[in-house]
Amino acid sequence: METERRVRLFRNGRNQALRIPRELELEGDEAILRKEGDQLVLTPLKRKGLLAVLAELEPLDEPSPDVGKGLPPADNVSL
């Protein structure tokens, strides 16, 4: 696969844009663009699964609320 290709820059409204050739396309629909000196570096963002996001959360320092408080016992519920 080619890793380098000459492309043309164009205007899209007030933004400068370029078309990414098919052989250089990135997966996903989001990326981070940063400038390093005279170069632009484009890094694709990979979506994390829910378990990965939850694993990154800090534990809570407060107790969980009693969600059953004030509700009748389960054996007294009529349908």
Image (cartoon, rainbow, N blue to C red):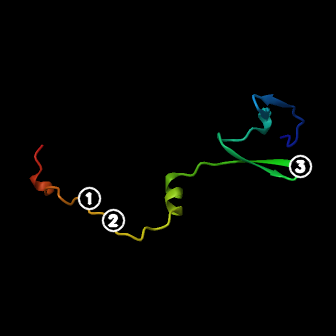
Write the residue at 11% across / 55% down.
Answer: 75
Of the residues shown, which amino acid type is indicated by label 2? Ser
* SS class, disc 2: loop
Amino acid beneath label 3: Asp
Q: What residue is pinned by disc 2?
A: 64
Q: Amino acid at mark 1?
A: Val
Left or right, 44 with respect to 2, comes to: left
For disc 3, the neighbor class at 10 Å (few under 14, some 14 to 19, many from 20) is: few
Q: Residue 35: percent from the left, percent from the top?
A: 81, 50
Question: What is the C-alpha distance between the residues marked 3 and 1?
Answer: 57 Å
Secondary structure of residue under mark 3? loop
How far is disc 2 from disc 1 in space, using C-alphas?
8 Å
Q: Quadrant of residue 72?
A: bottom left
Name the residue at 66% across, 43% down.
30
* 17 and 26: which is toward the camera: 17
Residue 38's disc number = 3
Q: Give the quarter of the figure containing the C terminus.
A: top left
- In x, y percent, where is residue 78? 10, 46
Q: Are marks 2 and 1 in contact (CB under 8 Å)?
A: yes
Q: Quadrant of residue 20?
A: top right
Instruction: Provide the residue designation for mark 1.
Output: 67
